Image (spheres, grey):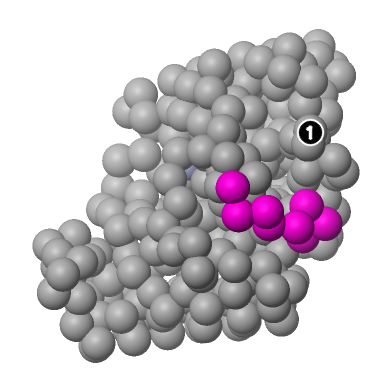
Amino acid sequence: MILFGDYHTHTKYSRHNHGKGTILQNASVALNKGLKQIAITDHGFNHMFYGVRRRDIPSVKEDILNAKEVTGVDILLGVEANLISNDGQIDILEQDFEFLDILLMGHHRMVKTPTMKDFNQLIIANMFGSPYKLSKDRLNRNTTAFLKALDKFPIDVITHLNYGCPTDTLAVARLAKEKGTLIELNGKRINFTDQELEIMAEEGVKFIVNSDAHSPERVGECNNALNTIFRLGLPLSQIVNIDKLPKFSPKR
Ligand SMILES: [Zn+2]
Ligand SMILES: [Zn+2]
């Protein structure tokens, strides 16, 4: 089983030294590891500390062109957008589709939300509510927020689902399947039970394996996900970037 591409990598454009490397460094590591394609997906604009800035996008584009030329690796421009409201709002504007080749979306802490209520329920409650006291209300609220986001936006990939924000996994995965959205098997963390993974696989949910690298040397490092796939015998035909290249719907 060969990984053809890594569609979740961060760079210095995720601010405050959160992402460590340059786009060229990510692409060079990808080349050395035999990847044919990568995506640069820095944190969404509403992240208070790490978010890429809209005004940096022209420079991201320029770096991508240069890195493609130097390495020959194909590079997609994306963002790992943030879920910012109970109503499924994410931090992407209509105008952003002008430059997006791929749209990732996940839950992150410390993001600017439209209202205090969203902040309290989506961020604070999920930060301090221990998994052992996960209330039905919080689980339903989180799940609804993801379902609404899937309905509203052409999301290609849901990143690290359930990490820091527990949901009804199967409800989210079923709508994702219907919408053509991929469920990420993250190279660092998988917050699904084996049973959930087996049911998703049985129901035809499509997966993508990504490193979520925050430094160049971790680009293409997906052993945690690959081991899970191997251990459970998940069908490789349902993993879009193993032994083949995925296609993402055009955004513009
Ligand atoms: Zn993330
Ligand atoms: Zn990430």
**Mark 1: secondary structure:** loop
Amino acid type at circle 1 is Ile
Q: Residue at x 55, y 19 (%)?
A: 216
Q: Quadrant of residue 121?
A: bottom left
Label 1: how many residues lie within 10 Å, few (<14), some (14-19) or many (20+)?
few
Disc 1 residue lies near ligand 2 with CB under 8 A: no
- In this rendering, the answer to whether 30 lies above or below 103 is above
Q: Which residues are magenta?
A: 231-238
Q: Which image quadrant: the N terminus?
A: top right
Residue 197, x across and y down, in percent: 56, 65
Answer left or right for 224 relative to 123: right
Q: Which residue is mark 1?
A: 2
Q: Residue at x 14, y 65 (%)?
A: 130
Does residue 58 appear anywhere in the picture?
A: no
Q: Residue at x 62, y 14 (%)?
A: 25
Q: Residue at x 19, y 82 (%)?
A: 135
- In this rendering, the answer to whether 176 lies above or below 80 is below
Residue 104, x across and y down, in percent: 59, 55
- In this rendering, the answer to whether 248 lies above or below 140 is above
Q: Which image quadrant: the C terminus?
A: bottom right
Residue 86 versus residue 49: which sits nearer the camera?
86
Q: Is residue 237 magenta?
A: yes
Residue 1 versus residue 107: which sits nearer the camera?
1
Does residue 239 appear anywhere in the picture?
A: yes
* SS assignment for the magenta stretch, majority: helix
